[in-house]
Image: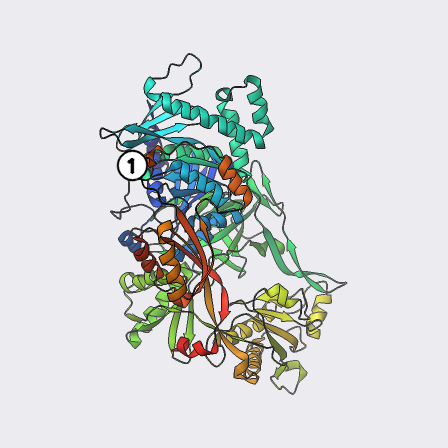
């Protein structure tokens, strides 16, 4: 009998004694940064809790239903039994360090998944073996693959009635478009009533059967299923041994198609069972990291079966920070110019992966770069900034530069997280995920820079000060609520609490409606805003009145405006500010629209609400052109600060909107010409902000009401329902939801031709668990519908399908509303 109990006890003692600092000495090659992603209720948090328990970090197994898990620590998470915020925990496993981020499964918290994926090197996708590939599974899978993140799939809940391992694997191939390589398969024993009891897994690569015999899952019986080397297999295990042999043959064949070395090893004996385990593991690791295959494992996390092999698979098949592509890095600086064409340079920065030091940026081994990907408020420690260290080493007490603001910050303590519990450490190295304390001036997406050699910013070049790691995209919010304090005295507390929530969650947006004098909070969905409301009222004790959830509508224009000129009418050129601009609407693709507008392609600025600001050719003021010609930027104000005045004015005016006071959307602001005082010592461009606002407002006023319109969010809807419910769900979508059904697909007909062919070729064990079970086919309905008609739809879908339907919605775009419905919307 093999036991993981020893490893758990050993690691538990070591982490206690060394206070985690021993983990920080782990080489980058022994680090894994992974996320756990899936559809809601597939078992992410349950699996994470078992990982924590078997690693020895805790002496008990947290339970989602009882609200005592390590990673779901918010009151709202415990009450609802769902993950709302991504949570990080560092797990020791067999002399490796695994940084795990447990992410939400609900679509309303998709930003939590997005920002987690930004700092991960690998992922585990967990699937419910009864439900198979669900709508949100496809979405998070696509998000991970778009970032080139290698994935392991874990087919969970194999103990449940109606579970289908083979069926789920086929869906993974057909719906997610990947090659599935079976690492282990389920093993069942016969119950007294003749039913099947899930007891363990057969490891295809090692040819071992693992049977979990105790309740807590620490002790595992290991049986050799290799019939060679005089090994006699008990008759009880003949069936699973034969199935293992069939699966191993399929694995060798699949790997052989992509790796000639596997074929060469097979040809030495022409025996699938004799291909060495190490050869298969090495090949599978290489192909997984390359994104060509997906290792498949199975288990039942709630029953404590199959989690330890999953941890082993993380080590065996997912990459270390040394095996990923170096991060995309750029540096925007105004201190270097090309004299011949007077263009501002935005230079790319070299980043490489070194076998010893990990990532090295700008060929500087002492340069430490970190990305802030999350900010939370801890009740005792204040604001805590989650960071991924990409290069160098960050020590507590270091001075850092925030490259977004240029501000120098002295950090306080460094921590790693065990769910809610922070553990103090002395340093974080390249590849580590940890927490910075002691700063209120760091936001999600900020790049942090320091010199690891002297723990300060001394020796950092101007180019390095402006380094930017690839930013974290923030999806636009589509729902909103009004929030008002109950009393005038409560306003300050409300403002402070909202500011804190927005810092934690950048997918929230706060606006002020001048027409109604209301504060408007926008978010990703109904549940998202409901959670925020609960946190404000229950956790932060803010006495406030919060309105009903409503859809966030926008305004736009139907034709371009004439050029409008504004100036501060100064009598002296030394103090003259002026701007001339025009507005241009577009419907779909910004780049396509720009093809028909003459502009300076070197200066394009993206604004909120799908708006943009561009400059006409040769529109730069003479004083700036002279500055571009100099070897060194001579002006007191930076170019960025000067441009920011135009951007700030444009953003403010577009946000206030037109006659309906809705934010303007999908508009290009073209600066035809502009001027600032002809002085290198100019120390303020504040008048340009107001002039730009006034020019945009005047442009809107000149357009007739017939050339203005209202836009509403349209959602791309993916629904999976039993075949028997397709009719009633489709009818409800078309009649009650004003939906346009794009297509309906039966299960197994998803994906490209390659995926369907690969699905048919993929060998899987027969699902004996489905014998005698009435398994109805599932159908995917893909449609588009106005968001205002989809409010509260999930509850309706569950009612129509008896709880068997799943839903995923994401913003498809904004659509114009007919004049006959504008009044209805505004009311």
Query: Vertical placement of 782 versus 308: above or below?
Result: below
Element marked by disc 1: helix
Q: Nearer the viewer, residue 221 or 401?
A: 221
* Residue 272 position in % (x across, y down): 50, 22
Residue bearing mark 1: 303
Q: Nearer the viewer, residue 477 or 616?
A: 477
Q: Nearer the viewer, residue 584 or 716?
A: 716
* Residue 566 position in % (x across, y down): 61, 83
- Most extreme residue toward the left is 192
- Most extreme residue toward the top is 230
Q: Is residue 321 left or right of residue 304?
A: right
Give the residue displayed 39% in from the left and 62% down from the top.
733
* Residue 393 position in % (x across, y down): 51, 44
Q: Residues within 10 Å of mark 1 (few under 14, many from 20)?
A: some
Query: Vertical placement of 218 versus 431: above or below?
Result: above
Query: Vertical placement of 610 versus 142: above or below?
Result: below
Query: Vertical placement of 569 versus 308: above or below?
Result: below
Is residue 397 in view?
A: no
């Amino acid at each position: 009998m093999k036991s993981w109990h020893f490893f758990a006890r050993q690691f538990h003692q070591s982490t206690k004694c060394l206070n985690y600092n021993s983990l920080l000495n782990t080489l980058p090659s022994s680090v894994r940064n992974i996320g756990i992603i899936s559809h809601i209720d597939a078992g992410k948090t349950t699996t994470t809790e078992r990982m924590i328990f078997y690693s020895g970090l805790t002496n008990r197994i947290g339970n989602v239903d009882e609200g005592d898990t390590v990673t779901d620590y918010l009151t709202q998470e415990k009450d609802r039994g769902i993950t709302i915020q991504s949570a990080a925990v560092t797990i020791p496993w067999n002399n490796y360090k695994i940084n795990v981020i447990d992410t939400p499964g609900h679509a309303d918290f998709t930003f939590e998944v997005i920002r987690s994926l930004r700092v991960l090197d690998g992922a585990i996708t967990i699937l419910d073996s009864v439900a198979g590939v669900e709508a949100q599974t496809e979405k998070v899978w696509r998000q991970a693959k778009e970032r080139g993140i290698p994935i392991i799939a874990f087919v969970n809940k194999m103990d449940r009635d109606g579970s289908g391992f083979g069926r789920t694997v086929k869906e993974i191939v057909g719906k997610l478009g990947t090659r599935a390589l079976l690492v282990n398969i389920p093993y069942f024993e016969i119950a007294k009533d003749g039913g099947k009891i899930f007891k363990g897994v057969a490891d295809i690569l090692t040819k071992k059967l693992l049977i979990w015999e105790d309740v807590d899952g620490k002790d595992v019986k290991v049986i050799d299923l290799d019939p060679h080397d005089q090994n006699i297999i008990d008759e009880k295990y003949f069936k699973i041994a034969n199935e293992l042999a069939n699966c191993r043959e399929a694995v060798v064949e699949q790997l052989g198609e992509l790796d000639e070395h596997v074929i060469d090893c097979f040809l030495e004996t022409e025996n699938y069972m004799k291909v060495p385990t190490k050869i298969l593991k090495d090949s599978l690791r290489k192909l997984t990291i390359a994104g060509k295959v997906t290792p498949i494992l199975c288990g039942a996390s709630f029953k404590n079966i199959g989690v330890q092999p999953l941890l082993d698979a993380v080590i065996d098949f997912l990459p270390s920070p040394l095996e990923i592509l170096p991060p995309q890095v750029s540096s925007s600086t105004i201190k270097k110019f090309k004299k011949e064409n007077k263009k501002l340079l935005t230079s790319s920065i070299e980043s490489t992966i070194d076998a010893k030091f990990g990532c090295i940026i700008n060929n500087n081994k002492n340069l430490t770069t970190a990305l802030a990907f999350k900010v939370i408020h801890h009740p005792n420690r204040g604001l805590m900034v989650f960071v991924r260290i990409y290069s160098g080493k960050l020590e507590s007490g270091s001075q850092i530069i925030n490259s977004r603001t240029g501000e120098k910050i002295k950090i306080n303590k460094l921590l790693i997280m065990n769910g809610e519990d922070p553990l103090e450490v002395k340093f974080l190295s390249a590849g580590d995920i940890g927490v910075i304390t002691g700063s209120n001036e760091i936001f999600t997406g900020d790049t942090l820079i320091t010199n690891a050699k002297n723990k300060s910013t001394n020796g950092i070049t101007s180019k390095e000060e402006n380094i930017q790691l690839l930013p974290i995209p923030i999806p636009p919010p589509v729902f909103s609520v009004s929030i008002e304090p109950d009393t005038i005295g409560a306003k300050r507390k409300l403002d402070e609490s909202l500011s804190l929530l927005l810092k934690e969650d950048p997918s929230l947006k706060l606006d002020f409606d001048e027409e109604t004098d209301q504060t408007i909070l926008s978010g990703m969905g109904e549940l998202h805003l409901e959670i925020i409301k609960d946190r404000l009222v229950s956790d932060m004790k803010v006495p406030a009145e919060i309105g009903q959830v409503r859809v966030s509508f926008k305004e736009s224009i139907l034709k371009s405006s004439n050029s409008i000129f504004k100036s501060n009418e100064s009598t002296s050129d030394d103090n003259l500010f002026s701007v001339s601009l025009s507005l241009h609407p577009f419907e779909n693709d910004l780049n396509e629209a720009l093809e028909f507008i003459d502009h300076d392609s070197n200066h394009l600025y993206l604004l909120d609400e799908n708006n943009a600001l561009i400059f006409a050719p040769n529109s730069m003021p003479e004083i700036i052109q002279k500055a571009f010609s100099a070897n060194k930027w001579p002006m007191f104000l930076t170019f960025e600060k000067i441009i920011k005045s135009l951007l700030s004015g444009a953003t403010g005016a577009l946000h206030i909107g037109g006659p309906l006071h809705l934010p303007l959307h999908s508009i290009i602001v073209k600066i035809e010409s502009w001027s600032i005082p002809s002085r290198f010592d100019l120390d303020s461009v504040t008048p340009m902000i107001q002039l730009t606002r006034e020019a945009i407002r005047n442009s809107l006023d000149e357009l007739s009401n017939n050339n203005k319109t209202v836009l509403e969010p349209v959602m791309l809807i993916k629904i999976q329902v039993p075949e028997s419910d397709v009719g009633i769900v489709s009818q409800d979508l078309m009649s009650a939801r004003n939906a346009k059904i794009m297509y309906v697909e039966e299960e197994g007909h998803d994906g490209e031709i390659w995926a369907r062919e690969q699905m048919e070729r993929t060998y899987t064990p027969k699902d004996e668990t489905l014998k005698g079970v009435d398994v109805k086919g599932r159908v995917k309905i893909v449609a588009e519908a106005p968001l205002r008609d989809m409010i509260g739809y999930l509850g309706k879908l569950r009612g129509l399908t008896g709880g068997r339907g799943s839903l995923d919605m994401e913003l498809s775009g904004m659509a114009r509303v007919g004049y006959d419905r504008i009044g209805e919307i505004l009311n």
